[in-house]
Image: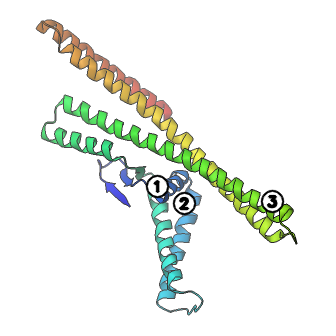
Amino acid sequence: MSETESNSVNAPTLIGLSRSPFNVVTFGVIQYLKGKTFLRAVIFTSGLLSLILAIVVYLNLFPMPSIQLAGKIGFFITGGLLLWMAVVSGSNFRVYIREAQATRERIKAEKQFKHSPNPSAALELDTKRLNEYYTINQGQARSSFRWAVFAMLSGLGTIIAGIWFFYLRQGLQDTFMTSLSTAAGLVVNAISGLFLYMHNKTKEQSVYYYDRLVRLQHISIAIQLAGTHGSEKAREDSTNKVIEYLLQSSELQNKVDTNEA
């Protein structure tokens, strides 16, 4: 289940996925595909061919008696899913796992900012957005790590089963089952590597969002403290210092972003 949210014109479209094992796996595949144009093209082509095959078989344009109704539906669902993943893994989309509480707080801050667009509401909105992103990344990191451990144990178990088929099973040694289970175990372990890769990337993003969140909290504290001075002159001087700091920080961040680009 997904939920698409619209931002500004230049910002990527946000697609929120509910937390489920299938969506966690889907998210991992989408994150892996980002920046990999060739793989995205292959998946897009595969999805398109799967949809075409489903339509051809459903309309009986090319009779295939061996393919039952479940197979036709499977081709259609697989094709649609592959096309969707190929599209949303592009730079115009950002897929994330939704966190209900953080999302509600962000939506509430957005409504407050629309009703009263003042600097305090803008700061609160930015804080809630960063908090939502940080919460999302923390949840993704935990999920990817759990799935990585599960995949590694599953792969190890499959490989052990292959060894049992070849060495410990009574009677004839089953070479085919040994090869099949070993290959499956290696594939599952490769998938666990994908989950660990995703875990590493989400942890890096978590550190980035945490640093930004701390910075916004410090700015909020500075603004509140500036307003606690007894005299009007002291409040004005403190506010000017906060404004000066914000302008200098903005210029410095622009220079860093320019150098990174």
Q: Residues within 10 Å of mark 1 (few under 14, many from 20)?
A: some
Marks 3/1 in contact by CB < 8 Å: the verdict is no
Above or below: residue 79 compared with residue 239? below
Disc 3 marks which residue? 163
The residue type indicated by label 1 comes to: Gly
Q: CA distance from mark 3 to mark 1?
A: 42 Å
Mark 1 residue element: loop
Q: Answer whether residue 254 is visible to the viewer in this image.
A: no
Q: Can you give x and y, in whole percent of width and height, for residue 140 in the image?
A: 47, 45
Q: Position of residue 233 (x, y in %)?
A: 14, 7
Question: Which residue is pictured at 53% across the width and 81% down the height?
Answer: 71
Three-letter amino acid code of the residue under disc 2: Arg
Between the residue at mark 3 and the residue at mark 2, the CA separation in whole angstroms equals 36 Å
- Give the number of the mark in front: 3 or 2: 3
Q: Read off the residue under disc 2.
A: 40
Mark 3 or mark 1, which is nearer to you? 3
Residue identified by numbered label 1: 90
Mark 2 crowdedness (10 Å alpha carbons): few <14, some 14-19, many ≥20: many
Q: Secondary structure at mark 2?
A: helix
Residue lying at 13% horizontally and 40% vertically, measured from the top left: 115
Q: Answer with mark 3 or mark 2, whichever residue precedes in sequence.
A: 2
